[in-house]
Image: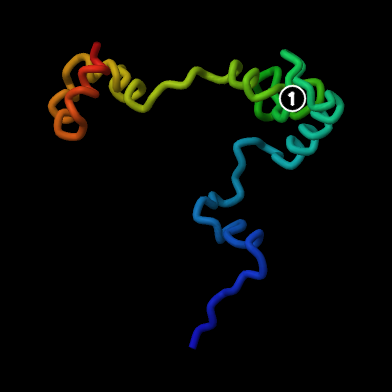
Amino acid sequence: MKEKKRYSSRSSYNKGSDNPNWNGGVSEYPNHYLMKKVRLEVLEEANYICQICGNKAMEIHHKDLSKDNHSKENFLAVCHKCQMQFKKPYTSKYKRLYGYTVKELIKSGVFKSWLDIKLNTEYINSMMY
């Protein structure tokens, strides 16, 4: 009889190759360990204060937009709101696929018959006008 694998604590559950999201140890950033180490140093030197607006900073921004350059001079301690200003604007899946948002598709009538079945007509009319 095969014995089941037991975990001593929840922290060891699904780590590394046992995790279903494991991708072979490949990181978005080359030398991820160095980046995380320097990130903490930059945040501590900035006293966890955003260098743009003065709010609490928990993130860093690469000044040169390169994911390879992990020097302290290249990092800027920022809050989440300021970090999001550097990122590309969010576009919905429908906008990327079809060039229109769901609201625009509803107004054009493309989804009207499908939505009539799924939702009540009052809600659709409120979205259209």
Locate residue 33: give its quadrant: top right
For the point 13% across and 27% down, which residue is it? Answer: 113
Give the answer, above or below, for where 107 lies relative to 43.
Answer: above
Give the answer, above or below, for where 74 lies relative to 19.
Answer: above
What residue is disc 1 on?
Answer: 56
Give the answer, above or below, for where 74 lies relative to 11.
Answer: above
For the point 57% across and 52% down, which residue is it? Answer: 24
Locate residue 75: give its quadrant: top right
Check the image and name the residue furthest to the top: 129
Residue 68 in percent (x, y) is at 69, 29
* Relative horizontal placement of residue 86, taking residue 34 as reference (left or right): left
Given residues 43 and 38, the one toward you in this image is 43
Residue 38 in percent (x, y) is at 80, 33
The C terminus lies in quadrant: top left
For the point 69% across and 23% down, which residue is it? Answer: 79
* Relative horizontal placement of residue 31, taking residue 47 as reference (left or right): left
**Dot 1 alpha-carbon crowd within 10 angstroms: few under 14, some 14 to 19, many 20 or more:** some
Given residues 28 and 78, the one toward you in this image is 78
Q: Helix, strand, or loop for circle 1?
A: loop
Q: Amino acid at mark 1?
A: Lys
Residue 127 in percent (x, y) is at 27, 18
For the point 71% across and 26% down, which residue is it? Answer: 60
